[in-house]
Image (spheres, rainbow, N blue to C red):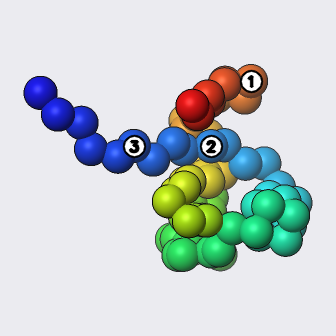
C-alpha cells in the first residue's frame, strides 16, 4: 500500500482576513480560486514550497476547532 500527498481543507469565515493571513503574513501564494456565482462560497488553493492548503467557505468543509498536525 502506498499513499500520495494529502491536501487539508481548512474552513474560512472571512475571505479578506484569510487572504491577509495566508498570503501577507505567512507568505503563501494564491494558486487558484473558485466561486460559482458572486455571492456563493469561495474555495481556493494556496501554497508555499511543498505545503498546499485548500481554504473553503463551504458550510460542510472541515469543522471549526479541528486540529491539523504536521511533523
Depth check, front residue: 38 or 30: 30
Question: Which residue is outermost to the front?
Answer: 71
For marks 1 and 2, give the CA distance: 10 Å
Marked residue nearer the N-terminal end (1 or 2): 2
Residue shown at 78%/48% (left/top)?
A: 13
Q: Nearer the viewer, mark 3 or mark 1?
A: 3
Q: Give the image location of residue 3, x and y in percent.
A: 24, 36
Report if the CB atoms under discs 2 and 3 are less than 8 Å apart. no
Binning the other alpha carbons within 10 Å of mark 3 as few (below 14), some (14 to 19) or many (20 upward) gives few
Residue shown at 54%/55% (left/top)?
A: 51
| The C terminus: image quadrant | top right
Compared across the picture, whether 6 is left or right of 35 comes to left
**36 vs 10: above or below:** below
Marked residue nearer the N-terminal end (3 or 1): 3
Q: Give the image location of residue 63, x and y in percent.
A: 64, 28
**23 vs 9: above or below:** below
Q: Give the image location of residue 55, x and y in percent.
A: 61, 54
Q: Give the image location of residue 22, x and y in percent.
A: 76, 61
* Local SS, label 3: loop
Please tell me the numbered disc located at residue 65. Answer: 1
The residue wearing badge 2 is 10
Depth check, front residue: 56 or 7: 7
Amino acid at each position: 500500500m502506498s499513499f500520495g500527498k494529502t491536501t487539508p481543507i481548512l474552513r474560512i469565515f472571512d475571505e479578506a482576513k484569510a487572504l491577509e493571513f495566508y498570503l501577507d503574513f505567512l507568505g503563501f501564494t494564491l494558486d487558484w480560486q473558485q466561486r460559482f456565482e458572486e455571492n456563493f462560497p469561495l474555495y481556493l488553493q494556496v501554497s508555499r514550497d511543498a505545503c498546499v492548503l485548500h481554504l473553503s467557505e463551504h458550510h460542510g468543509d472541515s469543522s471549526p476547532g479541528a486540529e491539523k498536525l504536521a511533523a
